[in-house]
């Protein structure tokens, strides 16, 4: 006979037994059967819990054909081993839901089963007309005699690591010992006796006082931290988790998150902490040799989440006025106690864009306006223009002289920060500007001017020598006029 056939036969025998009991007792009160929507029994599994070597199912079951009398419930494990009991435990909530049937319909069924995964199914055995009903199935994992647990987190603090989690041993009602190792050498012991109601809900047999917190001394640097639950009684000790952590030294640590330049002022933001103090430390901003400093005391809960030992007051915002051009911006954390001050990060910022002529894609071209019409005059090429970022333009940017109605068309060109200094040198050479000579000896002079979009940009304007030459040939240009031939 197969498993299903055996199970059906058992259920039929149990149904017959219940019917016999019901017939031997008092007859059902008139109208009682009408309180349920079906002649079949109903009920549910409230909970299936496991413990070492066993499983327990709890719930309720009623059958209107049995009136207030209990019915039999039957539990199968993996469709084979089974046990049964009367559903007669007190359930006041059922008396509220079904007053005519009374409260005595709760059940608790336990079975011994080997360690490992299992499927538990519970049936309510029918009494009178109808058929037996499945109350459902649950998948469970029955523990063996080895301890269980996990590492929830490992935090690195100055000079030590702290491991936190939970552990329990099926053979002991008392807190178990946990052992934390750093790099499989240095170790410390602790007891898993802290409150963990979440563990009690998941593993009722374990109880609620199963949390642990174990600290181990550790030198600065990277480490592997492993935690073991020490066995009690049968079974063996077990590793319950490992983590990689970095223990801070005595130098400050932190990060430069943003560096912006706006209106001649550079601003840096970020955070910094010093392992030797939980209080704020000083952050210092350097820009091309100039500096300013402030206490890093802005609240940063995200930093506190990663470094709980440091607290949250470690954010900074630093600003410094700067001249136009490219700049090297660095922020330092100033040391407190042992250790040394440390650079948290550096950035190179670009200066104002350059005003150039023509298309950046095809090279550099000169144009001028005659009678309101744009005329191409020259076209030259400058290597590396594809490394620049075009930022847009308006035409024309400048009109050198109202009398001859000549002007220049062009566009503004941003330069990536790493190329800014070399771009200045290349354009100076191309435009025949020597920053080491006085302006009166220049053909062109580099000046910072405002474009029609309101942006400060470097432009090359006619120097005194160039203006004198152009006037000598009848072109009315004065020193400082923006003109490219």
Image (spheres, rainbow, N blue to C red):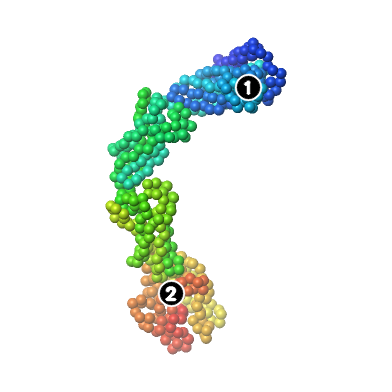
Q: Identify residue for label 1.
A: 102
Left or right of 31: which side holds 304?
Answer: left
Q: Quadrant of the C terminus?
A: bottom left
Decide which of 314, 39 is in the foreground and name it: 314
Task: Give x and y (percent) for residue 310.
Answer: 37, 49
Find residue 387 and report its image quarter. Answer: bottom left
Q: Nearer the viewer, residue 18 or 184?
A: 18
Farthest top residue in view:
24
Q: Position of residue 200 (x, y in %)?
A: 46, 31
Could you give the CA–CA distance between mark 1 and mark 2, rounded to whole angstroms? 94 Å
Label 2 sits on a secondary structure element that is strand
Residue 143 makes an appearance in the image: yes
Residue 196 location, x and y as percent?
44, 35
Place residue 265 in its image quadrant: bottom left
Residue at image location 45% in from the left, 66% down from the top: 262
**152 left or right, relative to 251:** right
Give the quarter of the figure containing the N terminus: top right
Residue under the image location 64 percent in, 14 percent down: 22
Image side of residue 482 versus residue 238, left or right: right
- Sequence-wise, which precedes: disc 1 or disc 2? 1
Report if residue 123 is visible in the image.
Answer: no
Q: From this view, report whether residue 57 is shown above or below residue 434.
A: above
Q: Secondary structure at mark 1?
A: loop
Above or below, 481 relative to 415: below
Q: Which mark is residue 448?
A: 2
- Tell me what residue is drawn at x 36 percent, y 41 percent: 162
Question: Callout 1: few (<14), some (14-19), or many (20+) C-alpha neighbours within 10 Å?
Answer: many
Residue that lies at the very extreme toward the right in this rendered image: 30
């Amino acid at each position: 006979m197969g498993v299903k056939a055996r199970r059906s036969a058992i259920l039929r025998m149990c149904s017959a037994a219940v019917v016999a009991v019901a017939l031997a007792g008092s007859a059902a009160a008139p109208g009682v059967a009408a309180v349920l929507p079906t002649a079949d029994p109903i009920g549910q599994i409230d909970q299936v819990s496991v413990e070492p070597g066993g499983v327990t199912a709890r719930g309720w079951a009623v059958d209107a054909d049995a009136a207030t009398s209990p019915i039999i419930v039957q539990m199968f494990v993996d469709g084979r081993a089974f046990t049964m009991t009367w559903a007669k435990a007190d359930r006041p909530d059922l008396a509220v839901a079904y007053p005519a049937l009374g409260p005595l319909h709760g059940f608790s069924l336990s079975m011994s089963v080997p360690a490992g995964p299992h499927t538990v199914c519970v049936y309510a055995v029918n009494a009178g007309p109808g058929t037996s009903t499945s109350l459902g199935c649950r998948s469970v994992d029955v523990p063996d005699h080895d301890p269980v647990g996990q590492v929830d987190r490992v935090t690195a603090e100055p000079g030590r690591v702290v491991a936190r989690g939970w552990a329990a041993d099926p053979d002991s009602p008392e807190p178990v010992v946990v052992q934390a190792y750093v790099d499989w050498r240095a170790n410390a012991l602790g007891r898993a006796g802290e409150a963990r109601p979440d563990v009690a809900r998941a593993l009722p047999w374990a109880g609620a006082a199963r949390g642990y917190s174990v600290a181990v001394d550790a030198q600065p640097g990277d480490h592997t931290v492993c935690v073991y639950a020490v066995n009690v009684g049968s079974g063996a000790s077990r590793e319950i988790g490992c983590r990689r952590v970095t223990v801070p030294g005595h130098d400050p640590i932190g990060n430069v998150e943003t560096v912006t330049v706006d209106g001649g002022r550079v601003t840096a933001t970020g955070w910094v902490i010093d392992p030797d103090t939980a209080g704020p430390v000083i952050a210092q901003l350097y820009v091309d040799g100039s500096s300013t400093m402030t206490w890093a005391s802005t609240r940063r809960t995200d930093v506190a989440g990663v470094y709980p030992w440091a607290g949250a007051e470690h954010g900074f915002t630093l600003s410094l006025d700067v001249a136009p051009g490219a700049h090297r911006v660095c922020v330092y954390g100033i040391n407190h106690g042992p250790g040394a001050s440390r650079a948290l990060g550096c950035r190179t910022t670009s200066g104002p864009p350059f005003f150039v002529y023509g298309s950046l894609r095809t090279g550099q071209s000169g144009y001028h306006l005659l009678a309101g019409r744009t005329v191409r005059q020259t076209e030259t090429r400058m290597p590396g223009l594809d490394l620049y970022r075009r930022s847009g333009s308006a035409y024309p940017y400048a009109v050198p002289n109202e009398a001859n109605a000549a002007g220049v068309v062009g566009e503004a060109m941003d330069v990536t920060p790493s190329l800014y200094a070399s771009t200045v040198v290349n354009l100076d050479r191309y435009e025949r500007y020597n920053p080491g000579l006085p302006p009166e000896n220049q053909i062109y002079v580099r000046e910072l001017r405002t474009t029609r979009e309101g942006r400060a940009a470097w432009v090359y304007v006619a120097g005194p020598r160039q203006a004198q030459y152009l006037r000598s040939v009848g072109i009315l240009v004065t020193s400082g006029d923006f003109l490219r031939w």
